[in-house]
Image: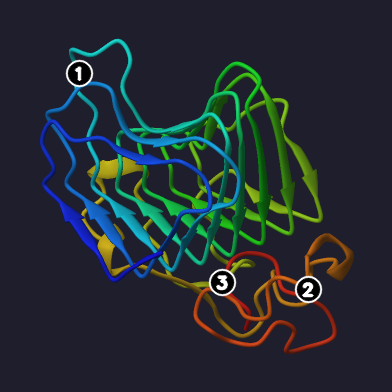
């Protein structure tokens, strides 16, 4: 287990998760100018908890450039994936995300080969591309808001989908309205909910693994009302 590490401005570096590896309270940012895979993930039970993945840029001259090569199993809980032009990929493995915020990426999650992705109570907003590629993608109690392109064959369960920046009903506290990495305010955005949000009590508890997750991304208890809220934040 690695706790509190910061990986910034890496050059010509690749990190391998070989199974039963846990990174907690870590930050990965400004990874650029290196063609290929930044993280390789093999084996089972690899986890990222309370981690931030920020401003990772792809090499425009590279044919094969991605943030994660997932061959095994990776679980991300209470993580931020923001401001990246480099996609987070599930190649032949499984990616599961709980209470994660995926916003203002020019390329979001890419599914390649036989990779599969399951997202529970995540907020996916203002991305240039939310999901793309082939594979199995299931979303549970997620908020999809103001994304330019979403994967057509995604299966959603009790999700709220807003294809523009209309914030009248969703009532996000301080969202970033401009899509992708060109937004100037994504790093100061607040994706939590305000009173009267259509996300409050709109989720289905059946679709949330209460045996694993007790709080939202901000540490608030799930559930605070009649039912679980949609998205990464509980009001």
Q: Which residue is mark 1?
A: 60
User: Which of these two is toward me, 51 or 103?
Assistant: 51
Q: Position of residue 153 (x, y in %)?
A: 73, 26
Callout 2 secondary element: loop
Q: Residue sitting at 25 percent across and 60 percent down? A: 185
Q: Which residue is mark 2?
A: 210
Residues at marks 1 and 3, CA–CA distance in whole angstroms: 36 Å
Q: Which residue is mark 3?
A: 171
Q: Nearer the viewer, mark 2 or mark 1?
A: 2
Which circle's residue, 1 or 3, is located before the other in the chain?
A: 1
Which circle's residue, 2 or 1, is located before the other in the chain?
A: 1
Mark 1 crowd level (few <14, some 14–19, many ≥20, 10 Å Cα):
few
Q: Which mark is residue 9?
A: none
Q: Which of the 4 quarters of the picture holds residue 138?
A: top right
Residues at marks 2 and 1, CA–CA distance in whole angstroms: 42 Å
Q: Residue sitting at 51 percent across and 37 percent down? A: 130
Residues at marks 2 and 3, CA–CA distance in whole angstroms: 26 Å
Count the labels in the image: 3
Q: Residue sitting at 18 percent across and 35 percent down? A: 13
Mark 3 crowd level (few <14, some 14–19, many ≥20, 10 Å Cα):
some
Find the residue positioned furthest to the right: 206
Callout 3 secondary element: loop
């Amino acid at each position: 287990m690695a706790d509190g590490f910061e990986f910034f401005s890496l050059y010509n570096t690749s990190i391998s998760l070989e199974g039963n590896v846990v990174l907690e309270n870590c930050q990965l940012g400004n990874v650029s100018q290196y063609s290929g895979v930044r993280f390789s993930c093999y084996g089972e039970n690899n986890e990222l908890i309370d981690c931030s993945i920020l401003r990772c840029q792809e090499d425009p001259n590279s044919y094969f450039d991605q943030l994660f090569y997932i061959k095994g199993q990776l679980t991300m809980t209470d993580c931020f994936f923001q401001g990246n032009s480099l996609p987070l990929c599930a190649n032949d493995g499984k990616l599961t995300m709980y209470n994660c915020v995926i916003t203002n990426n020019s390329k979001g999650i890419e599914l390649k080969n036989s990779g599969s992705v399951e997202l529970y109570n995540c907020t996916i907003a203002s991305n240039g591309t939310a999901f793309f590629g082939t594979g199995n993608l299931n979303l549970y109690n997620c908020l999809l808001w103001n994304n330019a392109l979403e994967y057509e064959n995604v299966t959603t369960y009790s999700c709220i989908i807003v294809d523009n920046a209309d914030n009248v009903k969703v009532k996000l506290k301080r969202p970033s309205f401009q899509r992708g990495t060109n937004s100037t305010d994504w790093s100061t955005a607040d994706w939590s909910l305000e009173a009267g949000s259509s996300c409050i009590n709109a989720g289905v508890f059946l679709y949330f693994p209460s045996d694993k997750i007790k709080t939202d991304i901000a540490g608030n208890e799930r559930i605070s009302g009649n039912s679980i809220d949609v998205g990464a934040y509980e009001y």
